[in-house]
Image (cartoon, rainbow, N blue to C red):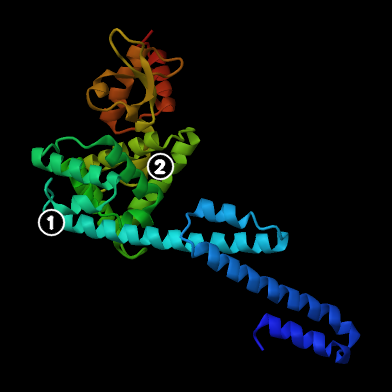
Protein backbone atom coordinates (compact mmCIF):
# COMPACT_ATOMS: atom_id res chain seq x y z
CA UNK A 1 0.00 0.00 0.00
CA UNK A 2 1.74 3.19 -1.22
CA UNK A 3 -1.08 5.76 -1.20
CA UNK A 4 -0.96 7.84 2.04
CA UNK A 5 -4.76 8.32 1.99
CA UNK A 6 -5.42 4.58 1.74
CA UNK A 7 -2.88 3.93 4.51
CA UNK A 8 -4.62 6.46 6.77
CA UNK A 9 -8.05 4.96 6.04
CA UNK A 10 -6.81 1.42 6.76
CA UNK A 11 -5.25 2.56 10.03
CA UNK A 12 -8.41 4.31 11.22
CA UNK A 13 -10.43 1.20 10.41
CA UNK A 14 -8.12 -1.25 12.17
CA UNK A 15 -6.50 0.77 14.93
CA UNK A 16 -8.62 -1.01 17.56
CA UNK A 17 -6.82 -4.22 16.67
CA UNK A 18 -3.32 -2.71 17.04
CA UNK A 19 -1.33 -2.77 20.28
CA UNK A 20 -1.78 0.61 22.03
CA UNK A 21 1.96 1.18 22.55
CA UNK A 22 2.50 1.14 18.76
CA UNK A 23 -0.19 3.67 17.90
CA UNK A 24 1.85 6.89 18.48
CA UNK A 25 4.70 5.61 16.27
CA UNK A 26 2.30 4.66 13.49
CA UNK A 27 0.54 8.03 13.75
CA UNK A 28 3.87 9.81 13.45
CA UNK A 29 4.90 7.74 10.43
CA UNK A 30 1.60 8.32 8.65
CA UNK A 31 1.84 12.08 9.30
CA UNK A 32 5.40 12.16 7.92
CA UNK A 33 4.37 10.21 4.81
CA UNK A 34 1.40 12.51 4.24
CA UNK A 35 3.57 15.61 4.70
CA UNK A 36 6.14 14.26 2.26
CA UNK A 37 3.45 13.65 -0.32
CA UNK A 38 2.00 17.15 0.10
CA UNK A 39 5.49 18.69 -0.14
CA UNK A 40 6.19 16.75 -3.33
CA UNK A 41 2.96 17.96 -4.92
CA UNK A 42 3.61 21.59 -3.90
CA UNK A 43 7.20 21.42 -5.14
CA UNK A 44 6.15 20.02 -8.52
CA UNK A 45 3.44 22.66 -8.89
CA UNK A 46 5.77 25.58 -8.09
CA UNK A 47 8.76 24.32 -10.09
CA UNK A 48 6.52 23.40 -13.00
CA UNK A 49 5.13 26.94 -13.16
CA UNK A 50 8.36 28.08 -14.83
CA UNK A 51 9.22 30.66 -12.17
CA UNK A 52 12.72 31.93 -11.52
CA UNK A 53 14.30 30.81 -8.24
CA UNK A 54 13.53 33.99 -6.31
CA UNK A 55 9.82 33.95 -7.26
CA UNK A 56 9.55 30.23 -6.55
CA UNK A 57 11.03 30.66 -3.08
CA UNK A 58 8.67 33.55 -2.35
CA UNK A 59 5.69 31.41 -3.28
CA UNK A 60 6.93 28.51 -1.16
CA UNK A 61 7.42 30.76 1.87
CA UNK A 62 3.81 31.93 1.59
CA UNK A 63 2.58 28.45 2.63
CA UNK A 64 0.94 28.76 6.05
CA UNK A 65 1.72 25.30 7.46
CA UNK A 66 5.27 25.69 8.93
CA UNK A 67 6.23 22.01 8.54
CA UNK A 68 4.99 21.87 4.93
CA UNK A 69 6.61 25.23 4.15
CA UNK A 70 10.04 24.10 5.39
CA UNK A 71 9.93 20.90 3.34
CA UNK A 72 8.86 22.67 0.14
CA UNK A 73 11.55 25.35 0.50
CA UNK A 74 14.21 22.69 1.14
CA UNK A 75 13.10 20.63 -1.86
CA UNK A 76 13.04 23.64 -4.16
CA UNK A 77 16.57 24.68 -3.13
CA UNK A 78 17.85 21.26 -4.18
CA UNK A 79 15.81 21.31 -7.38
CA UNK A 80 17.04 24.74 -8.49
CA UNK A 81 20.65 23.94 -7.48
CA UNK A 82 20.56 20.85 -9.70
CA UNK A 83 19.09 22.85 -12.56
CA UNK A 84 21.64 25.66 -12.19
CA UNK A 85 24.46 23.13 -12.10
CA UNK A 86 23.20 21.50 -15.28
CA UNK A 87 22.83 24.88 -17.01
CA UNK A 88 26.40 25.89 -16.08
CA UNK A 89 27.80 22.58 -17.30
CA UNK A 90 25.97 23.02 -20.59
CA UNK A 91 27.21 26.62 -20.92
CA UNK A 92 30.80 25.56 -20.19
CA UNK A 93 30.61 22.77 -22.77
CA UNK A 94 29.08 25.07 -25.40
CA UNK A 95 31.68 27.78 -24.67
CA UNK A 96 34.53 25.30 -25.03
CA UNK A 97 33.09 23.98 -28.29
CA UNK A 98 32.75 27.56 -29.56
CA UNK A 99 36.37 28.31 -28.66
CA UNK A 100 37.52 25.16 -30.44
CA UNK A 101 35.77 26.39 -33.60
CA UNK A 102 37.03 29.95 -33.14
CA UNK A 103 40.68 28.96 -32.64
CA UNK A 104 40.75 27.28 -36.06
CA UNK A 105 40.08 30.69 -37.67
CA UNK A 106 40.40 33.48 -35.05
CA UNK A 107 38.91 36.32 -37.07
CA UNK A 108 36.22 38.90 -36.32
CA UNK A 109 33.79 37.28 -38.78
CA UNK A 110 33.97 33.84 -37.16
CA UNK A 111 30.35 32.78 -36.39
CA UNK A 112 31.46 31.28 -33.04
CA UNK A 113 31.62 34.83 -31.63
CA UNK A 114 27.84 35.14 -31.92
CA UNK A 115 26.95 32.09 -29.84
CA UNK A 116 28.82 32.79 -26.59
CA UNK A 117 28.18 35.08 -23.63
CA UNK A 118 29.03 38.81 -23.88
CA UNK A 119 32.12 38.29 -21.74
CA UNK A 120 33.44 35.51 -23.98
CA UNK A 121 32.54 37.57 -27.06
CA UNK A 122 34.77 40.39 -25.77
CA UNK A 123 37.63 37.93 -25.23
CA UNK A 124 37.27 36.47 -28.72
CA UNK A 125 37.14 39.92 -30.34
CA UNK A 126 40.23 41.07 -28.42
CA UNK A 127 41.95 37.78 -29.31
CA UNK A 128 41.21 38.27 -33.03
CA UNK A 129 42.34 41.90 -32.99
CA UNK A 130 45.62 41.12 -31.25
CA UNK A 131 46.19 38.13 -33.51
CA UNK A 132 45.70 40.35 -36.55
CA UNK A 133 48.12 42.98 -35.24
CA UNK A 134 50.55 40.31 -33.94
CA UNK A 135 51.21 42.39 -30.83
CA UNK A 136 53.03 39.77 -28.80
CA UNK A 137 56.37 41.39 -27.98
CA UNK A 138 55.19 41.79 -24.37
CA UNK A 139 52.66 39.81 -22.39
CA UNK A 140 49.43 41.21 -21.02
CA UNK A 141 50.25 41.36 -17.29
CA UNK A 142 46.79 40.32 -16.11
CA UNK A 143 46.85 37.20 -18.32
CA UNK A 144 50.44 36.31 -17.43
CA UNK A 145 50.01 36.74 -13.68
CA UNK A 146 46.69 34.87 -13.51
CA UNK A 147 48.19 31.86 -15.33
CA UNK A 148 51.36 31.97 -13.23
CA UNK A 149 49.31 32.04 -10.02
CA UNK A 150 47.06 29.24 -11.27
CA UNK A 151 50.10 27.06 -11.98
CA UNK A 152 51.50 27.72 -8.51
CA UNK A 153 48.37 27.46 -6.37
CA UNK A 154 45.96 25.36 -8.46
CA UNK A 155 48.14 23.05 -10.62
CA UNK A 156 45.29 20.58 -11.18
CA UNK A 157 43.29 23.42 -12.82
CA UNK A 158 46.32 24.70 -14.76
CA UNK A 159 46.89 21.25 -16.25
CA UNK A 160 43.54 21.36 -18.11
CA UNK A 161 43.69 25.07 -19.04
CA UNK A 162 43.64 25.69 -22.80
CA UNK A 163 46.72 27.90 -23.25
CA UNK A 164 45.89 28.53 -26.91
CA UNK A 165 43.06 30.80 -25.74
CA UNK A 166 45.66 33.01 -24.04
CA UNK A 167 48.39 32.80 -26.69
CA UNK A 168 47.73 36.22 -28.33
CA UNK A 169 48.02 37.88 -24.91
CA UNK A 170 51.44 36.35 -24.17
CA UNK A 171 54.89 36.97 -25.58
CA UNK A 172 56.37 33.93 -27.39
CA UNK A 173 58.84 33.37 -24.54
CA UNK A 174 56.17 33.49 -21.82
CA UNK A 175 53.82 31.26 -23.82
CA UNK A 176 56.60 28.69 -24.35
CA UNK A 177 57.54 28.79 -20.67
CA UNK A 178 53.95 28.23 -19.52
CA UNK A 179 53.42 25.47 -22.10
CA UNK A 180 56.57 23.68 -20.91
CA UNK A 181 55.42 23.98 -17.31
CA UNK A 182 51.99 22.57 -18.20
CA UNK A 183 53.55 19.66 -20.11
CA UNK A 184 55.77 18.83 -17.12
CA UNK A 185 52.88 18.97 -14.64
CA UNK A 186 50.74 16.70 -16.84
CA UNK A 187 53.17 13.83 -16.41
CA UNK A 188 52.44 11.33 -13.57
CA UNK A 189 53.53 12.66 -10.19
CA UNK A 190 56.78 11.15 -9.00
CA UNK A 191 57.77 10.00 -12.51
CA UNK A 192 59.07 13.28 -13.87
CA UNK A 193 61.91 15.23 -12.31
CA UNK A 194 60.84 18.49 -13.93
CA UNK A 195 57.30 18.27 -12.50
CA UNK A 196 58.70 17.53 -9.05
CA UNK A 197 61.17 20.43 -9.37
CA UNK A 198 58.39 22.86 -10.34
CA UNK A 199 56.15 21.84 -7.44
CA UNK A 200 59.03 22.09 -4.94
CA UNK A 201 59.98 25.50 -6.30
CA UNK A 202 56.40 26.77 -5.99
CA UNK A 203 56.03 25.46 -2.43
CA UNK A 204 59.29 27.08 -1.30
CA UNK A 205 58.33 30.35 -2.99
CA UNK A 206 54.94 30.32 -1.29
CA UNK A 207 56.58 29.78 2.09
CA UNK A 208 58.94 32.73 1.62
CA UNK A 209 56.15 35.03 0.45
CA UNK A 210 54.13 34.08 3.52
CA UNK A 211 57.11 34.92 5.74
CA UNK A 212 57.38 38.32 4.05
CA UNK A 213 53.67 38.94 4.64
CA UNK A 214 53.00 39.27 0.89
CA UNK A 215 49.37 38.22 0.46
CA UNK A 216 48.20 40.22 -2.58
CA UNK A 217 47.56 37.72 -5.36
CA UNK A 218 48.84 39.90 -8.19
CA UNK A 219 52.05 40.67 -6.28
CA UNK A 220 52.60 36.97 -5.54
CA UNK A 221 52.01 36.15 -9.20
CA UNK A 222 54.53 38.81 -10.25
CA UNK A 223 57.12 37.27 -7.91
CA UNK A 224 56.50 33.77 -9.27
CA UNK A 225 56.78 35.05 -12.83
CA UNK A 226 60.09 36.82 -12.10
CA UNK A 227 61.33 33.69 -10.32
CA UNK A 228 60.49 31.56 -13.36
CA UNK A 229 62.40 33.95 -15.61
CA UNK A 230 65.45 33.99 -13.33
CA UNK A 231 65.50 30.17 -13.15
CA UNK A 232 65.32 29.91 -16.94
CA UNK A 233 68.06 32.55 -17.27
CA UNK A 234 70.27 30.59 -14.84
CA UNK A 235 69.73 27.37 -16.81
CA UNK A 236 70.68 29.08 -20.09
CA UNK A 237 73.80 30.69 -18.63
CA UNK A 238 75.11 27.63 -16.76
CA UNK A 239 73.75 24.84 -18.93
CA UNK A 240 72.05 23.13 -15.98
CA UNK A 241 69.04 23.60 -13.72
CA UNK A 242 69.71 25.51 -10.47
CA UNK A 243 69.95 23.48 -7.29
CA UNK A 244 67.98 24.13 -4.11
CA UNK A 245 70.59 26.52 -2.67
CA UNK A 246 70.83 28.43 -5.94
CA UNK A 247 67.05 28.75 -6.15
CA UNK A 248 66.94 29.99 -2.56
CA UNK A 249 69.56 32.57 -3.48
CA UNK A 250 67.51 33.74 -6.46
CA UNK A 251 64.40 34.10 -4.30
CA UNK A 252 66.20 36.09 -1.60
CA UNK A 253 67.68 38.35 -4.29
CA UNK A 254 64.23 39.01 -5.73
CA UNK A 255 62.83 39.75 -2.26
CA UNK A 256 65.53 42.31 -1.47
CA UNK A 257 63.79 45.49 -0.15
CA UNK A 258 64.57 48.84 -1.69
CA UNK A 259 63.15 51.80 -3.52
CA UNK A 260 62.50 52.76 -7.13
CA UNK A 261 63.91 56.16 -8.10
CA UNK A 262 61.22 58.21 -9.83
CA UNK A 263 62.22 61.72 -11.01
CA UNK A 264 59.84 64.48 -9.87
CA UNK A 265 57.79 61.95 -7.88
CA UNK A 266 58.17 60.37 -4.44
CA UNK A 267 60.32 57.22 -4.52
CA UNK A 268 58.32 54.01 -4.34
CA UNK A 269 59.20 51.36 -1.78
CA UNK A 270 59.34 47.95 -3.40
CA UNK A 271 61.00 44.56 -3.44
CA UNK A 272 63.46 43.90 -6.20
CA UNK A 273 61.08 41.64 -8.13
CA UNK A 274 58.54 44.47 -8.34
CA UNK A 275 60.94 46.55 -10.43
CA UNK A 276 60.36 45.42 -14.00
CA UNK A 277 61.29 46.82 -17.38
CA UNK A 278 62.95 50.24 -17.17
CA UNK A 279 62.44 50.32 -13.39
CA UNK A 280 65.11 47.63 -12.89
CA UNK A 281 67.86 50.17 -13.52
CA UNK A 282 66.23 52.57 -11.05
CA UNK A 283 65.95 50.11 -8.15
CA UNK A 284 68.18 50.76 -5.16
CA UNK A 285 68.46 48.32 -2.22
CA UNK A 286 67.71 49.72 1.20
CA UNK A 287 69.36 47.99 4.17
CA UNK A 288 69.26 49.57 7.60
CA UNK A 289 72.71 50.71 8.68
CA UNK A 290 74.21 50.61 5.18
CA UNK A 291 74.55 53.76 3.02
CA UNK A 292 72.70 53.49 -0.27
CA UNK A 293 75.78 53.90 -2.48
CA UNK A 294 77.69 51.24 -0.55
CA UNK A 295 74.65 48.94 -0.66
CA UNK A 296 74.52 49.15 -4.47
CA UNK A 297 78.23 48.33 -4.79
CA UNK A 298 77.94 45.42 -2.36
CA UNK A 299 75.04 43.96 -4.35
CA UNK A 300 77.21 44.02 -7.49
CA UNK A 301 80.06 42.32 -5.59
CA UNK A 302 77.81 39.61 -4.15
CA UNK A 303 76.35 38.83 -7.58
CA UNK A 304 79.81 38.72 -9.16
CA UNK A 305 80.92 36.17 -6.54
CA UNK A 306 77.73 34.13 -6.93
CA UNK A 307 76.69 34.76 -3.32
CA UNK A 308 73.14 35.28 -2.07
CA UNK A 309 72.01 38.90 -2.23
CA UNK A 310 70.29 39.15 1.15
CA UNK A 311 70.02 41.92 3.72
CA UNK A 312 72.25 39.90 6.09
CA UNK A 313 75.00 39.40 3.48
CA UNK A 314 74.92 43.07 2.48
CA UNK A 315 75.24 44.14 6.13
CA UNK A 316 78.00 41.57 6.81
CA UNK A 317 80.05 42.65 3.78
CA UNK A 318 79.61 46.30 4.70
CA UNK A 319 80.85 45.68 8.25
CA UNK A 320 83.90 43.80 6.93
CA UNK A 321 84.63 46.64 4.51
CA UNK A 322 84.49 49.12 7.37
CA UNK A 323 86.85 47.00 9.45
CA UNK A 324 89.30 47.00 6.55
CA UNK A 325 88.91 50.73 6.17
CA UNK A 326 87.49 50.47 2.63
CA UNK A 327 84.42 52.52 3.51
CA UNK A 328 83.70 55.24 6.02
SS at badge 1: helix
Q: Is residue 300 left or right of residue 171?
A: right
Spot occupied by residue 314 in the image (x, y as percentages of width and height): 39, 23
How many numbered discs? Answer: 2
Spot occupied by residue 175 in the image (x, y as percentages of width and height): 20, 46
- Relative vertical location of residue 117 with respect to residue 192 in this rendering, above or below: above
N-terminal-most mark, 1 or 2: 1
Mark 1 crowd level (few <14, some 14–19, many ≥20, 10 Å Cα): few
Q: Is residue 324 left or right of residue 171?
A: right
**Label 1 with label 2: CB-CB less than 8 Å:** no
Residue 43 is marked as none
Spot occupied by residue 304 in the image (x, y as percentages of width and height): 26, 28
SS at badge 2: helix
Kindly report which numbered mark, 1 or 2, lies closer to the viewer in this rendering: 1
Identify which residue, 48 or 256, lies in the foreground: 48
Identify which residue, 22 or 223, lies in the foreground: 22
Residue 205 is marked as 2
Q: Residue drawn 13% across and 49% down?
A: 106
Spot occupied by residue 141 in the image (x, y as percentages of width and height): 27, 35
- Relative vertical location of residue 95 with respect to residue 201 in this rendering, above or below: below
Q: Quadrant of residue 192?
A: bottom left
Q: Quadrant of the C terminus?
A: top left
Asked if residue 146 can be seen in this view, the reply is yes
Identify which residue, 68 or 253, lies in the foreground: 68
Q: Quadrant of the N terminus?
A: bottom right
The residue under label 1 is 104
Asked if residue 236 can be seen in this view, the reply is no
Q: Residue drawn 34% across and 40% down?
A: 224
- Relative vertical location of residue 217 with respect to residue 94 in this rendering, above or below: above
Q: Residue drawn 47% across and 63% down?
A: 82
Amino acid sequence: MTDPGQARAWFQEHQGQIEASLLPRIEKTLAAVALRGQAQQAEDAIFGAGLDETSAMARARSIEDPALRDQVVSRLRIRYAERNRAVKQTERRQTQEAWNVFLKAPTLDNPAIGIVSPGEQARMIRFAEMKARKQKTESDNKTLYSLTLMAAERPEEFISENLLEHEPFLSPADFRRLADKQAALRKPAGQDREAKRILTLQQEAGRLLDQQGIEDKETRAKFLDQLDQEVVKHSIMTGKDPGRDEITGIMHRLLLPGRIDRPYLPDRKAHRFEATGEEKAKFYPVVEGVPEEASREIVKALEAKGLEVTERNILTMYQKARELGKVD
